[in-house]
């Protein structure tokens, strides 16, 4: 039986198991541009353990060329500052539910965050505060008496770069009847005090009101405007179907009374359900519900954003399902994986894995899905809770190389993904990160982990500790496609693998059966085959049956590209 070398196709449990080059099953295997490699093992990220589980994390790249990394818990927002977590929470901290999510966005040099329970948070350099806004009005609570020419003084804004608001009073027969804003100011995170002074008058009092910034679950930036969606406040946008956008190029502008700022809001009511995700694509905005998606274009004053339904059956399971890659959005929909480029309909891409994924996913915990994009390798990681997960925690990760259209799977017991920015470790900081040279992690000297200003995938594990996926691969497994024929018995003599990088060792278990579709363990023969002979990249098998496959296990970093068995026909039956 002459079988040609088979280019590896990767994880494809939904296809015919005899399809050349597919993996019927695999674990800790990631698709590359030329084949498949062992997934990097986790190593300690060098930061202290958080006091509570991470409910979201982000590396935000700013306009000035710097980057800031955050992690949010139920009670705090932390920033990685020189290799240590610094509490950057707003005054008083937070009191979130265990199922809440922190989500982040960068706008210029401002870092923004939402959690669905507190007002939009912002930070320019250090701690977070409620996003600074202007005054919306002043309420006169007492008119007093005897006033002639009162002076209204509004206290300075909380943000030093803000503008102090000003106002004037209207007096009738010594009584103040109204206070009118002449400059609504900016930079206020809490309502200012109003002081009324006059040479003769007494008894007047007033309070200031701030523009209501949003409380929402979803945040993203599109075409110079911040979008907050699925809001509970202000009242006019409360309910899961509303989007609310800031003024143009101003993340602090949330006053919709001036249409020329383009600050606006609107509901998406063509389809049922709340907004689950949002992203930008080019100058446009894309907003998702679980079973629908909308494309928004900025038409300018006076209409502003115009949203039209792209699909009324395809949406995104949650915000983290959506991954932006150049000019394409890749996302997990209600029944498949999809790619969308801002025109036409979303294109399904999960034909190799779709059924497996939705049979494996704990659908009741779909809101916990987390994602990471490895730009260097062009690989998207989606971590998700499987049916074997405890308490809906992420325990499995499916990987997709969008350049080759290939898939892999890896173990991933985590709280959420995080992008780690390399280059913060210096010679002087080595003793802070690791006490001795023997404590240094097992990472090859040429790993991207050591390269300045490169990123490494990471995650928070079940102990709230940051782990970097930068260690040597270990325990990668691949179940090959089946080889054989329904009518012919054959012997698999050897199995050869073409590597770009060989593992340090490898073993194999041969499986044989008489019918391809049999899943009855009593009809499947399992035999330990020979180890991987590195000198020839071969495994000696010498086993006979109608159908054959191998379960391969590799230790050490490797990258495999092709395989081919040596088969001898025995006869028909």
Image (cartoon, grey):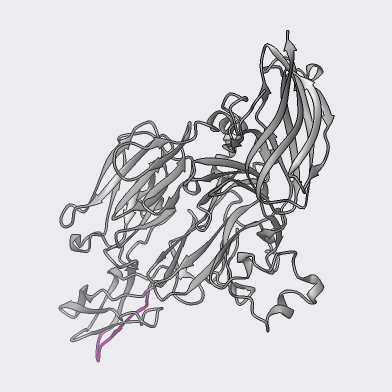
Task: Pick out the residue farthest to the bottom.
Answer: 199
Identified at 41% across, 38% down, the residue is 315
Closest to the observer, 284 or 438: 438
Q: Vertically, is 125 above or below 95?
A: below
In what quadrant of the picture does the C terminus appear? top right
Rendered location of residue 197, percent (x, y): 28, 87
Identified at 44% across, 40% down, the residue is 316
* Residue 95 is at least partly visible in this image: no
Task: Pick out the residue farthest to the top.
Answer: 573
Does the magenta run of residues contain 355?
no
Rendered location of residue 178, percent (x, y): 21, 72
Rendered location of residue 386, percent (x, y): 64, 37
Rendered location of residue 333, percent (x, y): 46, 37
Magenta segment's dominant SS is: loop
* Residue 421 is at least partly visible in this image: yes
Q: Quadrant of residue 301?
A: bottom left
Q: Which residues are magenta?
A: 192-201
Q: Quadrant of residue 388?
A: top right
Identified at 68% across, 80% down, the residue is 429
Closest to the observer, 134 or 199: 134
Q: Is residue 404 left or right of residue 572?
A: left
In what quadrant of the picture does the N terminus appear? top right
Q: Vertically, is 389 above or below 569?
A: below
Q: Is residue 236 left or right of residue 564?
A: left
Q: Quadrant of residue 423?
A: bottom right
Q: Vertically, is 57 above or below 345?
A: below
């Amino acid at each position: 039986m002459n079988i040609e070398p088979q280019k590896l196709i990767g994880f494809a449990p939904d296809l015919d198991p005899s399809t050349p080059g597919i993996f019927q099953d695999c674990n800790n295997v990631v698709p590359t541009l030329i084949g498949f490699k062992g997934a990097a093992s986790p190593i300690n990220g060098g930061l202290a353990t958080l006091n509570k589980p991470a409910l979201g994390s982000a590396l935000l790249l700013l306009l000035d060329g710097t980057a800031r990394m955050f992690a949010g818990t139920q009670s705090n927002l932390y920033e990685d500052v020189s290799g240590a977590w610094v509490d950057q929470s707003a005054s008083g901290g937070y009191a979130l539910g265990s199922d809440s999510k922190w989500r982040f966005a960068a706008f210029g040099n401002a870092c923004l965050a939402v959690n669905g329970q507190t007002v939009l948070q912002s930070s320019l350099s250090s701690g977070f505060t409620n996003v600074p806004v202007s005054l919306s009005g002043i309420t006169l609570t007492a008119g007093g008496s005897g006033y002639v020419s009162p002076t209204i003084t509004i206290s300075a804004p909380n943000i030093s770069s803000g503008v102090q608001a000003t106002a004037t009073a209207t007096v009738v027969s010594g009584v103040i009847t109204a206070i009118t804003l002449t400059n609504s100011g900016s930079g206020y995170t809490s309502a200012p005090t109003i002081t009324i002074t006059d040479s003769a008058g007494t008894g007047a009092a007033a309070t200031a009101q701030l523009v209501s910034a949003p409380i929402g679950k979803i945040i993203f930036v599109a075409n110079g405007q911040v979008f907050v969606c699925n809001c509970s406040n202000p009242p006019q946008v409360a309910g899961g179907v509303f989007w609310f956008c800031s003024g143009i190029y101003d993340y602090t502008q949330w006053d919709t009374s001036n249409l020329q700022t383009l600050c606006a809001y609107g509901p998406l009511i063509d389809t049922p359900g709340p907004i689950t995700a949002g992203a930008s694509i080019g100058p446009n905005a894309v907003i998702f519900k679980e079973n629908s998606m909308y494309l928004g274009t900025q038409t300018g004053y006076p209409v502003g954003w115009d949203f039209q339904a792209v699909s009324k059956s395809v949406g995104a399971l949650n915000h983290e399902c959506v991954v932006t890659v150049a000019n394409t959005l890749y996302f997990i929909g209600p029944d498949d994986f999809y790619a969308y480029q801002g025109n036409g309909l979303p294109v399904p891409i999960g034909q190799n894995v779709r059924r497996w994924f939705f049979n494996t996913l704990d659908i009741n915990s779909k809101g916990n899905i987390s994602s990471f994009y490895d730009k260097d390798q062009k690989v998207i990681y989606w971590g998700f809770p499987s049916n074997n997960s405890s308490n809906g925690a992420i325990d499995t990760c499916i990987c997709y190389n969008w350049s080759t259209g290939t898939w892999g799977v890896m173990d991933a017991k985590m709280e959420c993904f995080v992008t780690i920015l390399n280059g913060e470790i210096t010679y002087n900081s080595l003793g802070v990160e690791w006490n001795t040279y023997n404590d240094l992690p097992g990472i090859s000297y040429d790993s991207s982990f050591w390269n300045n200003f490169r990123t490494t995938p990471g995650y928070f594990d079940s102990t709230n500790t940051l782990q970097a996926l930068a260690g040597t691969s270990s325990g990668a497994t691949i179940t090959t496609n089946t080889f054989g024929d329904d009518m012919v018995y054959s012997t698999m003599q050897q199995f050869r693998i073409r590597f770009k990088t060989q593992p340090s060792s490898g073993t194999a278990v041969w499986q044989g059966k008489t019918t391809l579709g049999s899943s009855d363990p009593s009809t499947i023969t399992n035999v330990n085959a020979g180890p991987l002979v590195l000198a020839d990249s071969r495994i000696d098998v010498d086993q006979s049956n109608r159908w054959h496959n191998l379960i391969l296990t590799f230790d050490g970093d490797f990258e495999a590209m092709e395989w081919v068995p040596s088969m001898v026909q025995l006869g028909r039956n």
